Image (spheres, helix red, strand yellow):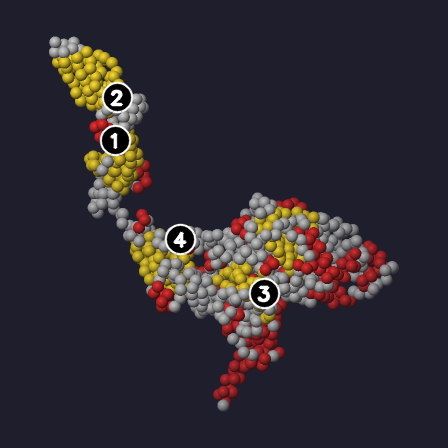
């Protein structure tokens, strides 16, 4: 009897120990993920920005609200806007993509006049700095897009290389993980004036303009910055590879309908009427001074 | 990218314990990674006594490296199990969980929107149930159910308007998919049935054999792909083909080609009347699929099945030792294309060591001659000149040695010496058939023919001066002449007396004896009287050529004393 | 201030003998899967017997062009009839698939209708789907255009109310009117 009791107790202790270890590892994963979203530690590893590559910058007028609770506190006054670059920039118009995939599929990818945002990652088969980007896309043996979903919100990710006349399809086939949307289009490089690879562009689907661009040491590093440039429209747009549904589809569709109606009436993100504030006086003046998307 | 994990057991392995628990609580089906099936072409399980081939097992090892099970995943899963146990421990523990359930794969619930498998609702038979027809098919690539090759799904559609089927969800077993609900058709089969007569999909069959082969005449071959369905299956899709690899022998160079002749039989118990295919590997490399179709009444009697399930195949193979492995290709459900046998065979080249050569050309030469050119050598003495024997019109003409330099032959075969020949043989006008043999100097007693040819030595007239006689003041010449270039026509003969031309005289007298000997028509005789002074005189008769430019040969000459 | 850009009205897309005029907000992909290059060929029945040599490749499998058009992002990897794409559709989304079939289908009863069809409300039903998904409805038609047998498969993200469905069908017909099938 005593022996049986001891055996049972021992087994219970083992199970509890396993549970504790599992919880600790899960916690470590969370910490590591948060650390990566913050862009990693300075001087960590040997990754450096490609020589001459511009740091990622975002469009003016983007709401810097990483903490949802802060957004709730902003009601009653005009939401603070921040120009990360510190200058008022005229963001260029975006373009749709036309090209072909590695499998010879001819494609037209819409980035303009759509509900979602599009993240264009310009890579090549021969650039040294692209290696970390290819690695991030292939992380964990799954679609790199799923691993980056948290960083990209619900925007669409497309890898863009130059056309078959300037790129090696065989090398790209080795580099590009399965399931990644890759379009070969020299025209896209020309349309966006891409200075070199790696290079990342965020296109705001509704405004049809570039909302962020630049480069980074890795896609993971840039994804945190990208997430901030993906506006409200992106959060309500069509999701990426993840099949998880955050909310019932009908609710999402209803929100899309509401946004469409507001935009048609000239009420965009940041409009004071959305926050119940006085449309005259200091709040309105501050809003008028702040550059941002206007209809 | 393969998601295979190595497994020696038939059927797919279950998902991990923690993963199953989470799936149950989330109301999802277990996600399983199907294993390469036993005996599939990528995982050799030999039944014939030969050793498994290393090349064929590489894929399984590679799949094992990519299987994804890790210590980290176990700990993470354990944490989830702990949480699940805290929420609903009794419900999970007491709910009956059958490993059987894992065989149905993804999307096995009615709400998932897919159609049921025919064996589930058709008494276990992987065939279209009554009141349905084959409407089309699609494939899922790289299916573990077919050893890494494509798995084919063939839809059985109802006939619209018959109302023989009602839309429902199957509620038996794990294949709880839709029956006669999805109004959809893939469109490659039964093209005679229009869309207006097409009803919903009753169920779907599965096969590892391409439908345009298995249902030849019913299904066409336009491909449709949906890899999402790669794991879909049902427990009743289960029996593997059976068979026997009876013999493997050297084909003996039949048909002038080295090879291995293999015989045996194979059939699929899911569709025992179907004549299936077998896949043949030679030294680990795939050769081809071959159909059964040879009558094997012994197999029919033993298994009580109709059809011709035997195979009798010659597989090309070079001289030397080889391993031949035969797989039976599944046409039903099942999880494997099993090995039915593997054998070791040695192929011998019956022509090894014999002389080799080529008769390059046979042509006419100057005068009435024939010229033969070519080369020959004996591998048993590659640097030595040998002899070639020439037969003309079936009669031996003689032996001639090689000895003409042929550097091209030396380069190709890597041998020294001078192995060419150029032989000139006098022949009469007419057609000639020649055969040239290379004389063996080494092992064996065969002198092989190295070439045959025909030549026609035409262009020169033939003839003969049969009679030359003299009377007072006159000489009589008689004989015959013709030109093979125009054998039916009369030609001329020219008469010379004492070296001086007298005149041309035509032939034209009947000479049936000449016609009979040469097989020609026409009148080719001549009987000429030439006035001549007394004394001895020399007469020469020439046949005048009427064909291609050439000489006017002498057909006869003689001396005669003309009396005074 | 940066004004939003107006998307282009219509964008043409063509390849493999198929073409479509994509309205604003629509994207498309035209593909042709590569012919399988395995080492086996299923022999014909007439070849049974000694002396067969075999051959390489899947004898006879026809890989023909497939056109996909949608007013939502099409994933890079899709089934020929839209699997992995249709699962992402919302109520206002439309998926159009046009698949070519082999010449042996010419003149058959199934492919008898001529010309790229147009669709109507009566052609759609929640069960007319390759895979039934909640809220969706589908339509499938077989036809021949320019001597090329084809199948049209349309999925819309709504079944009710009729006004919503009618508006979606109008968009479908707008796209269908811009589809071109070139002669072989």
Residue at (62% x, 57% y) in the render:
C140
Where's residue A272, x and y in %?
82, 60
The residue that label 1 is drawn on is B519
Q: Looking at the image, is mark 2 or mark 3 earlier in the sequence? A: 3
Q: Distance from label 4 to label 3 (Cα)?
A: 41 Å
Residue under disc 4 on the same chain as residue under disc 3: no
Residue at (67% x, 53% y) in the render:
C118
Q: Distance from label 4 to label 2 (Cα)?
A: 62 Å
Residue sitting farthest toward the bottom: A1
Residue under disc 1 on the same chain as residue under disc 3: yes
The residue that label 3 is drawn on is B162
The chain identifier of the residue carrying mark 3 reads: B
The residue that label 4 is drawn on is C47
Q: In this rendering, is residue B469 above or below B516?
A: above
Crowding around mark 2 (Cα neighbors within 10 Å: few <14, some 14 to 19, many 20+) is: some
The residue that label 2 is drawn on is B508
Q: Distance from label 2 to label 3 (Cα)?
A: 93 Å
Q: Distance from label 1 to label 3 (Cα)?
A: 80 Å
The chain identifier of the residue carrying mark 1 reads: B
Q: Distance from label 4 to label 1 (Cα)?
A: 48 Å
Residue B438 versus residue A209: which sits nearer the camera?
B438
Where's residue B530, x and y in %?
20, 13
Is residue A78 among the parts visible in the rendering? yes
Residue under disc 2 on the same chain as residue under disc 1: yes
- The image quarter in which residue A68 lies: bottom right
Give SS at disc 4.
Answer: helix
Where's residue A28, x and y in %?
60, 69
Q: State yes or no: discs 4 and 2 in contact (Cβ < 8 Å).
A: no
Residue at (16% x, 9% y) in the render:
B533
Residue under disc 4 on the same chain as residue under disc 2: no
């Amino acid at each position: 009897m005593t022996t049986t009791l001891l055996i049972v107790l021992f087994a219970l202790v083992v199970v509890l120990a396993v549970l504790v270890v599992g919880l600790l590892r899960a916690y470590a994963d969370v910490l590591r993920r948060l650390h990566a979203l913050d862009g990693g530690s300075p001087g960590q590893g040997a990754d450096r920005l490609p020589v001459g590559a511009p740091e990622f910058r975002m469009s003016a007028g983007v709401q810097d609200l990483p903490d949802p609770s802060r957004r709730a506190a902003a009601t009653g006054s005009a939401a603070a806007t921040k120009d990360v670059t510190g200058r008022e920039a005229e963001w260029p118009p975006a373009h749709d993509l036309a090209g072909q995939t590695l499998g010879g599929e001819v494609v037209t990818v819409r980035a303009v006049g759509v509900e979602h945002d599009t993240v264009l990652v310009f890579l090549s088969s021969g650039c040294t700095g692209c290696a970390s980007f290819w690695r991030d896309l292939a992380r964990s043996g799954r679609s790199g897009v799923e691993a980056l979903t948290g960083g990209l919100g619900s925007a669409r990710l497309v890898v863009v290389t130059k056309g078959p006349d300037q790129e090696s399809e065989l090398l790209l086939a080795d580099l590009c993980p399965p399931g990644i949307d890759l379009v070969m289009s020299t025209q896209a490089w020309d349309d966006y004036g891409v200075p070199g690879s790696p290079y990342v562009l965020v296109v705001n689907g509704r405004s049809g303009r570039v909302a962020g661009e630049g480069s980074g040491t890795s896609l993971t590093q840039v994804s945190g910055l990208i997430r901030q440039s993906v506006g409200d429209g992106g959060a309500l747009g069509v999701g990426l590879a993840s099949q998880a549904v955050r909310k019932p589809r009908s609710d999402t569709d209803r929100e899309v309908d509401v946004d469409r109606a507001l935009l048609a009436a000239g009420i965009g993100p940041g409009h004071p009427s959305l926050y119940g504030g006085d449309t005259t006086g200091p709040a309105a003046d501050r809003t008028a001074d702040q550059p941002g998307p206007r209809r | 990218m393969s998601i295979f994990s190595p497994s020696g057991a038939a059927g797919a392995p279950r998902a991990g314990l923690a993963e199953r628990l989470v799936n149950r609580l989330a109301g999802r089906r277990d996600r399983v990674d199907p294993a390469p099936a036993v005996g599939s072409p990528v995982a050799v399980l030999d039944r014939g006594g030969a050793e498994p081939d290393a090349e064929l097992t590489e894929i399984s090892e590679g799949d094992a490296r990519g299987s994804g099970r890790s210590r980290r995943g176990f700990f993470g899963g354990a944490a989830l199990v702990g949480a699940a146990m805290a929420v609903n421990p009794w419900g999970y523990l007491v709910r009956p969980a059958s490993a059987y359930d894992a065989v149905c794969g993804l999307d096995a619930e009615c709400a998932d929107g897919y159609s049921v498998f025919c064996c589930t609702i058709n008494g276990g038979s992987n065939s279209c149930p009554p009141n349905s027809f084959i409407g089309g098919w699609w494939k899922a690539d790289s299916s573990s159910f077919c050893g890494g090759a494509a798995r084919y799904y063939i839809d059985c559609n109802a006939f619209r308007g018959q109302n023989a089927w009602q839309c429902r969800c199957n509620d038996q077993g794990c294949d709880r998919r839709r029956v006669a609900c999805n109004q959809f058709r893939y469109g490659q089969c039964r093209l005679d049935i229009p869309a207006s007569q097409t009803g919903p999909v009753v169920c779907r069959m599965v096969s590892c054999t391409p439908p345009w082969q298995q249902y030849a005449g019913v299904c066409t071959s336009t491909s449709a792909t949906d890899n999402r369905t790669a794991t879909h299956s049902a427990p009743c899709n289960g029996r593997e083909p059976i068979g026997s690899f009876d013999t493997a022998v050297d084909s003996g160079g039949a048909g002038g080609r080295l090879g291995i002749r293999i015989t045996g039989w194979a059939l699929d118990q899911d569709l025992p009347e179907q004549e299936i295919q077998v896949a043949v590997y030679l030294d680990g490399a795939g050769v081809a699929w071959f159909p059964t179709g040879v009558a094997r009444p012994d197999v029919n009697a033993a298994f009580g099945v109709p059809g011709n399930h035997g195979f009798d195949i010659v597989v090309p193979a070079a001289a030397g030792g080889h391993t031949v492995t035969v797989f039976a290709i599944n046409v039903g459900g099942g999880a494997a294309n099993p090995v039915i046998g593997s054998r070791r065979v040695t192929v011998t080249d019956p022509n090894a060591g014999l002389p080799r050569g080529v008769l390059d050309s046979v042509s006419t030469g100057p005068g009435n001659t024939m010229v033969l050119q070519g080369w020959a050598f004996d591998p048993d003495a590659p640097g030595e000149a040998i002899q070639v024997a020439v037969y003309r019109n079936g009669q031996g003409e003689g032996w001639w040695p090689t000895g003409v330099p042929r550097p091209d032959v030396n380069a190709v075969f890597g041998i020294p010496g001078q192995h060419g020949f150029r032989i000139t043989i006098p022949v009469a006008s007419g057609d000639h058939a020649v055969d040239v043999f290379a004389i063996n100097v080494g092992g064996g007693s065969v002198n092989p023919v190295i070439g045959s040819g025909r030549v026609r030595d035409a262009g020169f007239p033939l003839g003969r001066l049969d009679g030359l006689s003299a009377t007072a003041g006159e000489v009589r010449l008689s004989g015959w002449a013709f030109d093979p270039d125009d054998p039916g026509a009369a030609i001329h003969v020219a008469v010379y007396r004492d070296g001086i031309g007298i005149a041309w005289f035509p032939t034209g007298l009947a000479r049936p004896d000449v016609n009979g000997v040469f097989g020609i028509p026409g009148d080719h005789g001549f009987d000429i009287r030439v006035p001549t002074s007394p004394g001895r005189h020399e007469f020469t008769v020439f046949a005048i050529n009427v064909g291609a430019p050439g000489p006017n040969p002498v057909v006869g000459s003689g001396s005669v004393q003309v009396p005074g | 201030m940066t004004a939003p850009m107006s998307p282009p009205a219509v964008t043409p897309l063509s390849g493999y003998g198929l073409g479509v005029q994509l309205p604003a907000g629509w994207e498309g992909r035209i593909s042709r899967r590569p012919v399988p290059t395995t080492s086996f060929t299923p022999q014909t029945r007439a070849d049974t017997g000694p002396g067969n040599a075999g051959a390489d490749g899947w004898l006879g499998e026809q890989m023909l062009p497939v056109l996909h058009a949608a007013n939502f992002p099409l994933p890079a990897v899709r089934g020929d009839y839209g699997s992995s794409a249709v699962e992402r559709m919302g109520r206002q989304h439309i998926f159009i698939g046009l698949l070519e079939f082999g010449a042996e289908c010419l003149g058959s009863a199934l492919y008898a209708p001529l010309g790229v069809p147009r669709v109507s409300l009566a052609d759609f039903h929640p069960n007319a789907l390759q895979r039934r998904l909640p809220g969706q409805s589908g339509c499938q038609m077989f036809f021949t255009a320019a001597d090329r047998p084809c199948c049209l498969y349309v999925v819309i993200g709504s079944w009710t109310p009729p006004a919503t469905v009618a508006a979606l069908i109008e968009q479908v017909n707008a796209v269908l009117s811009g589809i071109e099938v070139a002669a072989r």
